[in-house]
Image: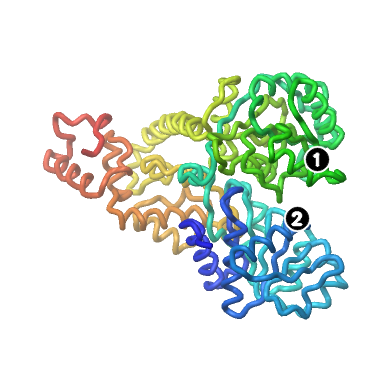
Amino acid sequence: MELREYQEEAMGRIFSEWERGIKKTLLVLPTGCGKTIVFAKVAEECVRRGGRILILAHRGELLKQAADKINKATGLMCATEKAEESCLGSWFRIAVGSVQSLSREKRLAQFPADYFDAIIIDEAHHSISDSYQRILCHFGEAKVLGVTATPDRGDMRSLGQAFDSLAYEYTLPKAIKAGYLSPIKALTIPLKMDLSGVGVQAGDFKSGDIASALDPYLRQIADEMAKHCMGRRTVVFLPLVKTSRKFRDILNGKGFAAAEVNGESQDRAETLAAFEKGIYNVLCNSMLLTEGWDCPAVDCVVVLRPTKVRSLYSQMVGRGTRLAEGKTELLLLDFLWHTERHELCHPADLICTDREVAGRMTRNLEAAAGRPADIEEAEKEALEDVVAQREEALAKQLAEMKGRKRKLVDPLQFEMSIQAEDLAGYAPAFGWEMAPPSEKQKQALEKLGILPDEIENAGKAAKILERLDKRRTEGFTTPKQIRFLEGKGFRHVGTWQFETAKKLIDRIAANGWRVPAGIKPEEYAGD
């Protein structure tokens, strides 16, 4: 099985991290972008090099799925470490293991500490739990790869406790633009639901409280779905099984062909198969289908289990992002949840890396409630709004700085000038990134024309130095050129070529350090 270009790159980055001594690294791919295929190929390469590999997952379905994909992608068979089955003594070099089984002390003690050379963790956002950590501590010398669909760096602050680096990240917008995933249209429904009394447990809203708060609105939600979801293959996520069953009955009363599945369903496989064939057009569940189930034909997702955990939100929406024949888009229904907490996930959290942009996008979508919006276009509009606000603030800041004749460029000015959204929205995730910039980093930044005093952490310093090196290679303007020309009123000098800026500075110098007549700095585009 041939890997896509980004999958090849991801695989190369993973081995590069391991080879440079980073034992625990992460791979981030959106749902539907073939993460299982990538780690299957990683496992195959480890076997080729003589290693023994453990694939860890927290659910039986994920273990079977991983074993099947590994066999399909590589031809290799897997041993199983689960319940009564053991991989000890097996001649297969890859084992798929249940966390629940392997984390038991008696079972773990049967394995030598160096039994596995590499451990791959599927759905790595679960890996912070004690059961996973017990296994990783036992096999302390093994290289570790965590694989997750978490959508942004900010969400990985907790994963930074368990992993030392991010080997590779492929974003949802890139996957959509490349045609690997379906475009997403978000539709904010003007139905205000009060969650202000909902409690929090283990970092997220309590399911029982959500169910109680949601119950009075179920019929109104069904009415809204009748307006927008008829003719679509829809998956609805709800907080409790009893709520899921109740909503199924309400939807059937509104003319839908709805079914419900849960962990105790005896006919779950038959129901899922019937949904995939189109016998049912709505599938209700209480968080059962967030992982390990794929139906590419799903073209509508309704999240009635609000969450502030981005990985969970991404998993729910990911049930509808795969491509299918005749499918043009995924419709994502969002509601006007009223809560005093601002961490609630919205469609903006799927695509925005900057919290300020995400907040603006959410407000824009809510203002346009009732009209579906392409999330990429909505993000672009929100970014333009935020950039305009930042530029206004920067102009005031630069005006205040004029009298100081600073020779170095403020990092904020540099980011705004080169229009670097990733730098402006950067959030440190791993331990070394959160540390203060090193003296070596500060000296390098100052030498290249950036004021290091305003950079709070080593991760941001590394990102800026990396960007400066890339800009130098590609022939873009230097920080000093940016400072000088923007001090004369020119805008976004960071997007210009080095030679363009140099020629303009030479003209200004020849004119007595005044802008030549006929050039309007605020309109000049670096031509």
Name the kind of residue labelled 2 in the image.
Glu
What coloring was used for the rendering? rainbow
Relative depth, front residue between 460 and 48: 48
Residue displayed at 81% across by 72% down: 86
Q: Is residue 265 above or below residue 470?
A: above
Residue displayed at 77% across by 74% down: 87
User: Residue tagged by mark 1?
Assistant: 261
Residue displayed at 66% across by 36% down: 345
Name the kind of residue labelled 1 in the image.
Val
Q: Quadrant of residue 491?
A: top left
**Image location of residue 2, percent across then percent down:** 50, 61
Q: Quadrant of residue 468?
A: bottom left
User: Residue tagged by mark 2?
Assistant: 61
**Image location of residue 492, percent across then percent down:** 33, 38
**Image location of residue 450, percent across then percent down:** 38, 51
Find numbered disc 1 in the image and state the secondary structure of the residue it sits on.
Answer: strand
Mark 2 or mark 1, earlier in chain: 2
Tell me the distance, in whole angstroms, between the alpha carbons under discs 2 and 1.
15 Å
Q: Is residue 270 left or right of residue 25?
A: right
Q: Is residue 272 above or below residue 129?
A: above
Q: Residues within 10 Å of mark 1 (few under 14, many from 20)?
A: many
Q: Is residue 114 above or below residue 249?
A: below
